Amino acid sequence: MTELDVNLPSVRQTQGSIKDKIEVSIKLLTGDVFVGRIVWQDPECLFFTDTNERKTLIYRQSIAYIQYQ
């Protein structure tokens, strides 16, 4: 398993949104869109909770984009 490279701007941006509890929109390659907060990240996945407190583990390779509000 690779380590999370905290020097990458994308990792720092995501960490900032976790720390500040910023709402994001995540669009997957399938076209599905999730709106809520990223709770934590690791090199493989993001753990996400939506406005209804549903918890979802999203693999990074399935993400088309993350839009920060």
Image: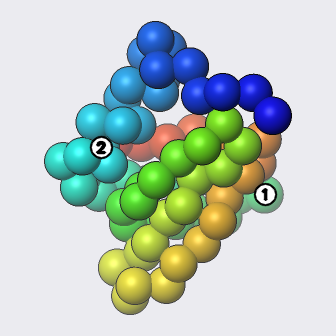
Residue at horizontal 60%, vertical 43%?
42
Q: Which mark is residue 30?
A: 1
* Residue 39 appears in the picture as rendered: yes
Is 31 displayed left or right of 34 in the figure? right
> Which residue is pictured at 73% across the width and 52% down the height?
59
Residue 58 quadrant: bottom right
The amino acid type of the residue labelled 1 equals Thr
Considering only order in the chain, which callout, 2 or 1, is on the residue closer to the N terminus? 2
Q: CA distance from mark 1 to mark 2?
A: 24 Å
Give the image location of residue 11, x and y in percent.
47, 27
Q: Residue at x 36, y 29 (%)?
A: 13
Q: Position of residue 6 (x, y in %)?
A: 47, 20
Q: Which residue is mark 2?
A: 17
Is the image coloured rainbow, by chain, by secondary structure, or in one colour?
A: rainbow
State the image coordinates of residue 2 (x, y, percent, origin top left): 75, 27
Which residue type carries mark 2?
Ser
At mark 2, the secondary structure is: helix
Q: Pick whichever, 47 or 63, lies toward us.
A: 47
Residue in front for this viewpoint, 4 or 65: 4
Determine whether, in the image, residue 15 is placed left or right of residue 44.
left
Residue 12, above or below 67: above
| Residue at position x 38%, y 66% in the image | 36
Residue farthest toward the left in the current orientation of the protein: 20
Residue 28: tell me if it is visible: no
Tell me if mark 2 has few (under 14), some (14-19) or many (20+) residues whose alpha carbon lies within 10 angstroms of its own.
Answer: some
Horizontal side of 60 relative to 56 (left or right) equals right
